[in-house]
Amino acid sequence: MIHPLDPLRDRAAVADLLTRAQDYYHLWLGHPPGPAQVEDVFTAGPPGCDPAASHRLGLWHGDTLAGVAELSFGFPAPPDAYLGLMILAPEARSQGQGATFLAHVESLARAAKARHLYLAVLEANARGAAFWARRGFAPTGLSRHDTGTGHTLHRLVKPL
């Protein structure tokens, strides 16, 4: 089941999920997730986007949170949508759940009349890049080096 995350009710579940999915945080940040990363699930978004218009979603298996996603609107341009985060617990990966979760995100973007769905993938995340490519995302040619983490991020896009 997929439904919006509640910052009060679901905070502990998000913290538990991020701990279970800490392999991604070790790859990205070089350390396990902490309170700042939990807070980011509820507050982060791309520049110029209205956080009140963003979707912060949870993928649930019964009472267990198996994934989170953040979808914002207006970046990089007003008619676009941006998937700032989609992460699944290791036990939820490679079972088609990522594709199901993404399909739900795409339906929300289409309902908002977005023309494109953008995201960024870490160059070091070959498995993630392969997932996005299988789902129809293509490189935009835009990349940036994050001096804070030392990673290069590549922007991908999928026409809706």
Image (cartoon, rainbow, N blue to C red):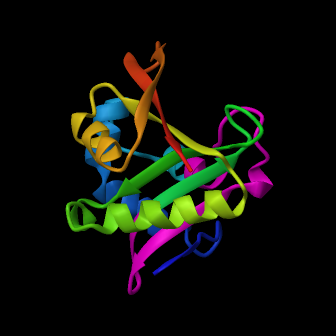
Look at the image and say whether residue 57 sits in the magenta stretch. yes
Is 51 placed above or below 64 here? above
Residue 87 vs residue 55: left or right? left
Residue found 47% across the figure and 12% down from its top: 147
Residue 56 position within the rendered picture, expressed as x and y whole percent measured from the top left:
60, 61
Residue 22 position within the rendered picture, expressed as x and y whole percent measured from the top left:
30, 48
Span of residues in magenta: 39-67
Viewer-proximal residue, 133 or 40? 133
Residue found 79% across the figure and 47% down from its top: 50
Look at the image and say whether residue 32 sits in the magenta stretch. no
Residue 77 vs residue 147: left or right? right
Residue 57 position within the rendered picture, expressed as x and y whole percent measured from the top left:
55, 65
Residue 139 position within the rendered picture, expressed as x and y whole percent measured from the top left:
42, 27
Viewer-proximal residue, 77 or 152? 77
Residue 18 seen in the current view: yes
- Give residue 108's quadrant in the image: bottom right
- Give residue 125's quadrant in the image: top left
